[in-house]
Amino acid sequence: MTGEKTWISGARNGIAAWLAALAPLLPGALLAQEGQERGALRVFLDCSDFICDDDFFRRAVPFVDYVRDREDSQVHVLIISQETGAGGNSVTLDFIGREGYEGMDDRNVVTVPPDTPEAEELARISRGIAAGLMRYVARTDILDQIRIEYEGEQPGVASPGDDPWDFWVFQASLSGGVEAEARQDEVSIEARLSANRVTDALKVEVSLDGEYQEQNFDIDDSTTVTSLERNYELETLAVWSIGDHWSVGGTAGLEHSTFSNREVAVRIAPALEYNLFRYEDSERKQFTILYTVGFNAFSWREETLFGETSERRVDQSLRASLSVRQPWGEVGGDFQLSHYLDDIDANRLSGGVFLDLRITRGLSLDLRAEASRVRDQINLPVGDATEEEILLELRELQTGFEYDFSIGFSYRFGSIFNNVVNPRFDSGFDNDF
């Protein structure tokens, strides 16, 4: 019996020694059964808008391995930014577990106040990323190297304060420029004033835009062609929330446009919208159906093709829009039909689709397509456009259709890791001959 125990003990020790030697070669999924992953966590950062700064995030969160392709990751971090009513950003961080972390999904939301410096904005997002990764890092063998600190005071009970602006946010901008050369000069001025108030129950937006552009072209010593374009527009929007899926509201506007032959155009359009999904999930998926009735009054700068100098029209439109963003990419589209009630033949049918798809490791497809059938150009002035008006785009031209299509592929290959940050020559280097 003693010899048998000795043999069993020796066999056990031998197996343990072999397992210890083979441990570095065992797949992560097997090691995960013991409750921990070997090595640093492999993370794929997925963000495509202006808020994404890969270099900053890699510096601020250095305790993981960043990979360049989702297929190599253990955690896929999907970063989506939406503008808040105050002019700041609400950044959603979706953590999607892969490999040994399937089913371990989580979400953090980072709110960035308006006028926050870019460095502070990125720092806030970085802290949100680091905090969200902790539950995954806790299953790796680098947990002992992580230290969590709290620098604030003991939190107390916060009391809501009164907002002296009552959630109203105002913005004003003014820009202009002058360009000139021997036979050409241009003067342009653009101005914008906006105000908005956004709460869960009500969204109100008001904007006033103005644009003036003058161009002069010297064809020869005695001939000068002048291009003059003026566009001014006042727009208002009010939307009330009705539950998780319904919204009701409308728009009102006033416009003057030399390009569209509008001396004065007035529009009032109530609308009703239904969202198949909850509005609070709009950063990941949204399918809306919007119905609008518009009351319009037009005063034309020049007599139209139909012999009108002013008229009143009522139109209606139905628009369906879909947008879905998932780890495999983003897809969406919209379809819209509109027409004047007194003349159903004066209509417009338009639609568009877009697709950003990760086909396979490193390979992505970007597809955009839009098309319209145009039958509602009641604003076109009588008479043919001059060469100057056509070439300088000073006047809307008659057309029966519009379309736009683009397709692109991108492929990345090489090392799966992407941790190193090297900013040298990022400021720009001119190597042109």
Image: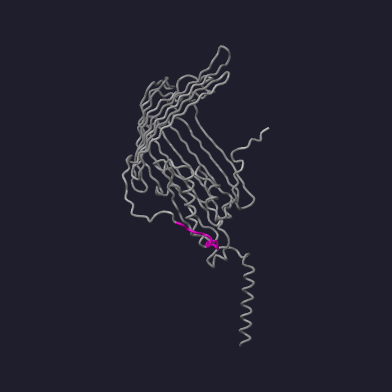
Q: Is residue 255 left or right of residue 222?
A: left
Residue most extreme to the top: 222
Q: Position of residue 394 (x, y in %)?
A: 49, 23
Q: Position of residue 253 (x, y in %)?
A: 37, 31
- Rendering quarter of residue 267: top left
Tell me: residue 395, above or below residue 112: above
Is the N terminus in the top left, top right, bottom left or bottom right quadrant? bottom right
Q: Is residue 415 left or right of residue 35?
A: right
Please tell me whether residue 408 belongs to the stretch shown in magenta.
no
Q: Nearer the viewer, residue 335 or 13?
A: 13
Q: Main secondary structure of the magenta part?
A: loop
Q: Position of residue 131 (x, y in %)?
A: 47, 55
Q: Nearer the viewer, residue 299 or 25?
A: 25
Query: Colour scheme of this structure image?
Result: one colour
The structure residue drawn at horizontal position 47% and vertical position 23%, both measured from the top left corner, is 229
Which region shows up in magenta?
A: 140-149
Tell me: residue 190, above or below residue 247: above
Q: Position of residue 54 (x, y in %)?
A: 55, 47
Tell me: residue 152, above or below residue 255: below
Please tell me whether residue 146 belongs to the stretch shown in magenta.
yes
Residue most extreme to the bottom: 1
Q: Nearer the viewer, residue 19 or 345?
A: 19
How many labels sit on residues?
A: 0
The structure residue drawn at horizontal position 42% and vertical position 27%, both measured from the top left corner, is 210
Is the C terminus in the top left, top right, bottom left or bottom right quadrant? top right
